[in-house]
Amino acid sequence: MVYQDHLTKFVVLRPLTSKRACEVAVQLMDIFALLGAPVILQSDNGSEFTAAIITELRDLWPELKLVHGKPRHPQSQGSVERSNGDIKDMLIAWMADNSTTRWSVGLRFVQFMKNRSYSAAIKRSPYQALFGCQPSLGLSSTSLPKELIDELHTEDDLRDFSLRNSGNSDAEMAADVHHADAVVADVHRADVVVADVYRADAMVADVHHADVVVADVHHADVVVADVHHADVVVADVHRADAVVADVHHADVVVADVHRAADVHSAGDAR
């Protein structure tokens, strides 16, 4: 059975043992419960068959109200027939590639491939038209190397990899940047913020609700720190042309500045 939403071109493929209205109705009920039901139901098997399906659906789901549609316009009918032909060809190719005759299993994969393929009629994939995003294949949809993905088996493995590569945790955020033209940090509700920057033309730090903020900056042309609700703020700056610190609601503010050429301004507003 091929069920298609005309608006998004999204298809659902289901294996049937017969074309009886009661069996089709059960499959449609599962689809409607997941994706929602249309107002108009059309079928290639004629209005009588469609009416029988709607009757079966009403018995299974009394609140559901559908009407059966008119015969399709020849152009629409041709589009449906081409789509059905594509599905048949894709299923044959899948069975050949996997050396199997289990076509009922292949329907799931053909459905996935069909829905993620670009449709010229709607200028996007049916999946994206329905859900607003492209389908994901888990870690395979990320930019991680395949050899690394093969080594990840548990959530702990993924967390350990993230910590090794980002150096970030719930309790600490650290940035070590060299030869940067500009360094910008915007951190909210972090327990510890550590910034270690060398030879940056500009460093701007905007930190909110941090328990401890530590900045160690060397050879920066401009250093600007805007810190709100911090328990401790420590700034150690060497050879900066300009240093500006704007601190609000900090319990302790410590500024240690060496050879700041132009400006050093510290404000403690409670």
Image: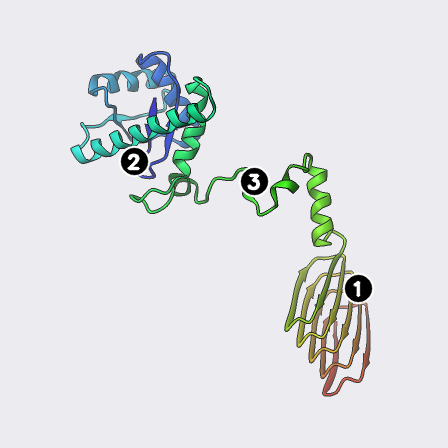
Mark pair 2, 3: CA separation: 30 Å
Give the amino acid type for the residue marked by disc 1 in the picture: Asp
Front in this rendered view, residue 188 or 99: 99
* Pair 2/3: label in front: 3
Going from N to C along the chain, the mark reached first, 2 or 1, is 2
Q: List x then y, in percent, for residue 198.
A: 74, 72
Which kind of residue does numbered mark 3 sit on?
Ser
How much space separates mark 3 and mark 1, taking CA atoms? 42 Å
Residues packed near mark 2 inside 10 Å, few (<14), some (14 to 19) or many (20 plus):
few
Tell me the element at label 1: loop
Q: Find disc 1 in the rendering and name its residue.
A: 231
Looking at the rendered structure, which numbered label has been put on residue 6?
2
Provide the residue designation for mark 3. Answer: 140
Dot 2 and dot 3 residues touching (CB under 8 Å): no
Q: Amino acid at mark 2?
A: His
Q: Nearer the viewer, residue 70 or 96?
A: 96
Query: Measured along the vertical axis of the image, is residue 244 above or below residue 136?
Result: below
First of labels 2, 3 by sequence position: 2
Quadrant in the picture for residue 183: bottom right
Q: Farthest bottom residue?
A: 262
Q: Is residue 81 above or below residue 160?
A: above
Q: Give the Cα distance between marks 2 and 1.
A: 59 Å
Helix, strand or loop under label 3: helix
The residue nearer to you, when weighing 152 against 124, is 152
Residue 180 coordinates in the image, percent (x, y): 66, 71
